[in-house]
Amino acid sequence: MGRCHASPTPVYLYVETIAPETPRERLLRLGPDCLADDELLALVLGRCGGRPAIDNARTLLAEFGSLRRLATRAPRELVDRGQVGGLQAARLGALFGLTRR
């Protein structure tokens, strides 16, 4: 996990000209171990219903308590309960299905 920390060499930049680094950019630069569960889940979900992906991810994690408990739910159940759309449910089903293989 040591790779997740910034280099010890200070870099001085004008803050107003730098956009915050997105989870996607951090994943590509540092790897998935450097992202929190909600950030990884947001990358899988994408935007849904006009809400930012990170908000959707946090809502799901708050509802189910963990990725492990979320993974026990059938994709259809998530859609029927109105928690995600069909595309997001299919993405989650595929992700959790792959992890069980």
Image: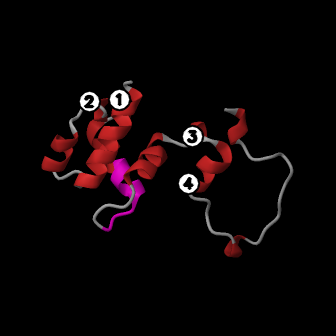
Image quadrant in which you'd find residue 30 = top right
17 magenta-colored: no
Residue receiving disc 2: 72
Label 3, residues with CA under 10 Å away: few <14, some 14-19, many ≥20: some
- The residue shown at (57%, 40%) is 32
Q: Amino acid at mark 3?
A: Pro
Q: Amino acid at mark 4?
A: Arg
Query: What secondary structure do most residues of the magenta stretch adopt?
Result: helix
Indicate left or right for 3 with 85 as reference: right
Specify start and end residues of the magenta stretch as a single range.
50-58
Residue receiving disc 3: 32
The label number, if any, that marks residue 24 in the structure image? 4
Seen from the viewer's position, the closer of residues 55 and 90 is: 90
The spot of residue 44 in percent (x, y) is 41, 48
Residue receiving disc 1: 68
Circle 2/circle 1 CB separation < 8 Å: yes
Image quadrant in which you'd find residue 76 = top left
Q: Amino acid at mark 1?
A: Arg
Circle 3/circle 4 CB separation < 8 Å: no
Residue, far left: 80
The spot of residue 74 in percent (x, y) is 21, 36
